[in-house]
Amino acid sequence: MEVWPFHDGNVHNLLENRHIDIGHDVGHSLQMHSSLIRRLSMEQELEDAPQTITSGILLCSLFEQGHQGCVNAVAWNSDGSLLISGSDDEQINIWSYSGRKLLHSIETGHSANIFCTKFIPQTSDDLVVSGAGDAEVRSFILSRLNERGLNDGAVTPSALYRCHTRRVKKLAVEAGNPNMVWSASEDGTLRQHDFREGTSCPPAGSSHQECRSVLLDLRGGAKKSLADPPRHTLALKSCDISSTRPHLLLVGGSDAFARLYDRRMLPPLTSCRKRMLPPTCVNYFCPMHLSDRGRSSLHLTHVTFSPNGEEVLLSYSGEHVYLMDINHASASLMQYTSGDASKLMTFTPVLNKLEHQQPLSSAFKNGLRSRSNTAARVIFFVMYFSYTLTWRLQIEKCRMLVEIAKRFLDEEINIFHAIEACNEVLDGHGSDIGPTLRLECFCTRAALLLKRKWKNDAHMAIRDCNNARRIDSSSFRAHYLMAEALEQLGKHKEALDFAVPAQCLSPYDTMAAEKVENIRKHLAAAEAEKSNKASNGAPRPEPRTGRVLSLTDILYRSEANSDALQDGQRPEREDSDFDEELEFDFETSISGDEGHDVVSNMLHGSVNLRIHRRGDSTKETGAYGSRGSPSSSSQNGAAYQPEAVIDMKKRYVGHCNVGTDIKQASFLGQRGEFVASGSDDGRWFIWEKKTGRLIKMLLGDDAVVNCVQCHPFDCFVATSGIDNTIKASIRLMGRLWTPTAAVPSLVAGGSAGPEAANVLEVMEMEHASDEIAVDVPPFSPSLPCFSLVACSD
């Protein structure tokens, strides 16, 4: 259903007006334009010898040599002339963008998978850096390789940092700074490496180690929920530095909260010997409905700044992609604290907040009084009528979209497109429409979300119902839909609190009466079951039998399970995974008389156990002064006060992110008007940032697409992933995408992608995969895959 245009305008109009609107950079708008994105189609899939394809002004060729393992990282240099990639084969490859050929293949010396690679700015692209699963950060000078040939073989690094104790998952560089690189590791620290101060450091745990490079010590910074104080190690998965305000640093890891820091306000660099309290951050970012889940598996896989530095994008494992505002002056920025999520689900009287918009006529008349010149009055009248006509057309368009959405709701068809129609009205024209139409659209979208029932749709419906109640506190639909959403979430007591007012607002409505009756029956049955259990007595736990597990068994099993879920490709233990302090809770429950244990040396309650590897100099006392978490000592016995958190601005759905913990979400284009993400089914998705509308779905890999990186200036995207197909000849397999489709469409044309009619079916399968934890197959050698996506004007 493509009945309304996108918000980036018409290409023809942009080109026609570029000489008039000199303040608007047409080049930035055309780099990633919706008309080009919607015409992307796979032109050819190449695996063999170099070939050349000509399409209009686009010239593409592919090269023979490549990685021999999964490609985990891709990054462009500042001018887009070079592309760097890192792989499970422990090699770095440098590719030429203009020549479409491999320039260097470097054997880095890493002993584990490479997870991140970067060009160091302001070095004429001569210095590159890599981080890997062996907990090392290595840098290489490319000019030293020019005489060595294409396959450069083993290369001595120009700098080697071995101070991390666990895998290095992300590197960050600062625009214009050739002297530093920042590394984020699963050991809970973010380190700042300065090439001017030293090019090496001793391995972690060395008796003579005194590497003062820790910028962020978050070994006691992870939070299970917003209300809980930070206690556990925050295993960092991603970090980014703002290109417009480089003092801002964004990190994300093994909990639900992304953190924004101002590097100017952080304490001096410290040694890893001394554990520090988590520093105060500028902002926390987390969607409100995820802040109090307390799920240990919920974590971030990628965080990034927008090109203008005003927004951040968060990608969650087993979840969706979310957009957040940074600028506190933004009207869309929403902050919340602990307990606000439950307040959304609690019935409280709401006063109407009808937005009384100033009539267009009065607004223009006020401006007209100040214009005495006759010519100016004529120009102003022309502008007034033109603006009025445009405004009326927009209102008619919004009414039409709401009617379409309501019809689809009644017919129970095209639910996904109906939700996108409501998104277009509320997110694309929310400031243009009046409160009546906005109320109707909020209620319609809530009903559609409850009908679709994808992950977190009920939470999104609750947001819409609350917004509708703020417009009209006596709205029957808002109260009824709120009760239905809470019922879907299993909150029947809260649902009854909204169902009863809905019945009072419309006493002759049979649906409301049935809703109240059904909820009361459910609550009565639950109460009766609870009473029966209480009267029969709690069941006595059966004594445990079987082999007694040793501490080694427990630690090995816990670590193996954790790594299998996070990486999906961990065949065996790695020594670097066991250098970090391990902390876990366990409870024992012994039957028998209270106060008399069956076994005298067994304990009731919860026990925290901390294990250090032998010879580790990191002690529990350190900066904390005593045993315990940093929060307990920093608060000096006072109650923990949770921080305020910035809520979501927009949600992007359709993809699946459960198989790997390096899956990226990124902004496309210099203006960042589109959002892209890889998926576990080998596809990658492109959405319009403003409305969340799905623009394109492309098949980029036979298994998983992890990385999506847009060219700095051209309409060209590099993606990488995993191809499980085993072939005799290991080559770089590329898929070339050009805007050559005969007609614009939602998916790539041809056999490589699903037909338009199957798009919803594909996303339904993605949603089912998100809901069910998948078992990732054991690691096997796999064919690396690049998808090179190119567009021309």
Image (tube, rainbow, N blue to C red):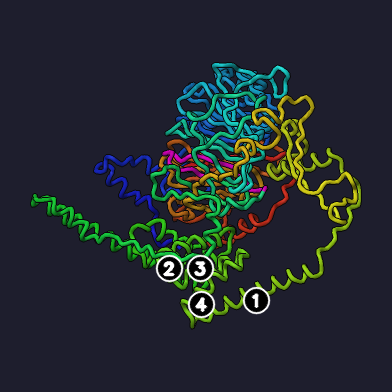
Q: Bin the neighbour count of mark 2 within 10 Å (Cα to Cα): few under 14, some 14-19, many 20 and up.
A: some
Measure the C-alpha gap from mark 4 to mark 3. 18 Å
Q: Is residue 542 left or right of residue 498?
A: right
- Assess whether mark 2 and mark 3 are in contact (beta carbons under 8 angstroms): no
Q: Where is mark 4, residue-wise?
A: 503
Q: Position of residue 675 (x, y in %)?
A: 49, 47
Q: Position of residue 164 (x, y in %)?
A: 66, 28
Q: Residue at x 89, y 55 (%)?
A: 543
Circle 4 SS class: helix
Query: Is residue 375 visible to the viewer in this orientation of the structure?
Result: yes
- Assess whether mark 1 and mark 3 are in contact (beta carbons under 8 angstroms): no
Q: Which residues are magenta?
A: 296-313
Q: Residue at x 64, y 39 (%)?
A: 632
Circle 3 SS class: helix
Q: Is residue 108 left or right of residue 532?
A: left
User: What is the three-letter code of the residue carrying label 1?
Assistant: Lys
Q: Earlier in the sequence, mark 4 or mark 2?
A: 2
Q: Where is mark 3, residue-wise?
A: 447
Q: Bin the neighbour count of mark 3 within 10 Å (Cα to Cα): few under 14, some 14-19, many 20 and up.
A: many
Mark 4 or mark 3: which is in front? 4
Q: Earlier in the sequence, mark 1 or mark 4?
A: 4
Quadrant occupied by the C terminus: top left
Tell which of 78 and 555 is nearer to you. Answer: 555
Measure the C-alpha gap from mark 3 to mark 2. 18 Å
Mark 3 or mark 2: which is in front? 2
Tell which of 694 and 134 is nearer to you. Answer: 134
Q: Where is mark 2, residue-wise?
A: 473
- Assess whether mark 1 and mark 2 are in contact (beta carbons under 8 angstroms): no
Measure the C-alpha gap from mark 4 to mark 2. 14 Å
